[in-house]
Image (tube, grey):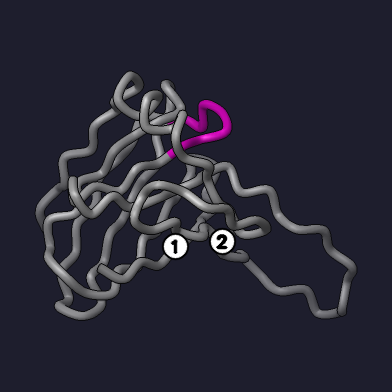
Amino acid sequence: MRLIKILSIPIICLIWSINCKTANASTLTTCSADSIIVIEPIPTQYPDTNVPRSPALVPISASYEAMLSTLFLTFTSNLGEIEVEVLNTTSGGYDSGTVDTQFHYAAVPITMGPGHYLILFTLPSGQRYKGELDI
């Protein structure tokens, strides 16, 4: 397993975020980036009964920029060190690393070539989120 280099780039991402609105599981808006990635919570357990639920607030927004082969992440607050796993389900390639969310932005290079990607995020609390991307 090879660790990917994950960069916290507040200045570049700040400039990038001025021209781009983000998406989460409940909203999807237009963006100048190539792909908006919808991030969904992964439930830890399912309730036995049908309980009315409100949409989950997702603290992570993501988009992919093809020209840079980079996944740009935005965080609603400082979530601490989160683990990011990137799996290319087409080729079987796998990378993982950690992101410091202190600056609320991060950039993750995607270096495994074309395919269908599953991106998993694990917060220090154990809460997990996922997103999918086709390159």
Q: Main secondary structure of the magenta part?
A: loop
Please report the residue visible at 53 percent of the width from the left and 42 percent of the height from the top: 21
Residue 1, which numbered label? none
Q: Which residues are magenta?
A: 74-80
Does the segment drawn in magenta span residue 68?
no
For the residue pair 110 and 34, the one nearer the viewer reads as 34
Looking at the picture, how far across and down is residue 82, in whole percent?
40, 40
Q: Quadrant of residue 119?
A: bottom left
Residue that badge 2 annotates: 40
Please report the residue visible at 38 percent of the width from the left and 58 percent of the height from the top: 35
Please report the residue visible at 48 percent of the width from the left and 44 percent of the height from the top: 123
Please report the residue visible at 51 percent of the width from the left and 26 percent of the height from the top: 78
Q: Quadrant of residue 59?
A: top right
Secondary structure under tag 1 reads strand
Residue 45, above or below 128: below
For the residue pair 90 and 135, the one nearer the viewer reads as 135
State the quadrant of the C terminus: bottom left
Residue 131, which numbered label? 1
Residue 9, above or below 6: above
Asked if disc 1 and disc 2 are in contact, CB closer than 8 Å, the reply is yes
Q: Give the class, few, some or many, for how many residues have Cα within 10 Å of label 1's Cα (few <14, many ≥20).
A: many
Q: CA distance from mark 1 to mark 2?
A: 6 Å
Looking at the picture, how far across and down is residue 107, in whole percent?
29, 38
Q: Give the class, few, some or many, for how many residues have Cα within 10 Å of label 2's Cα (few <14, many ≥20).
A: many
Looking at the picture, how far across and down is residue 31, in whole percent?
46, 48
Q: Earlier in the sequence, mark 1 or mark 2?
A: 2
Q: Is residue 5 left or right of residue 16?
A: left
Q: Is residue 43 left or right of residue 126?
A: right
Q: Disc 1 residue type? A: Gly
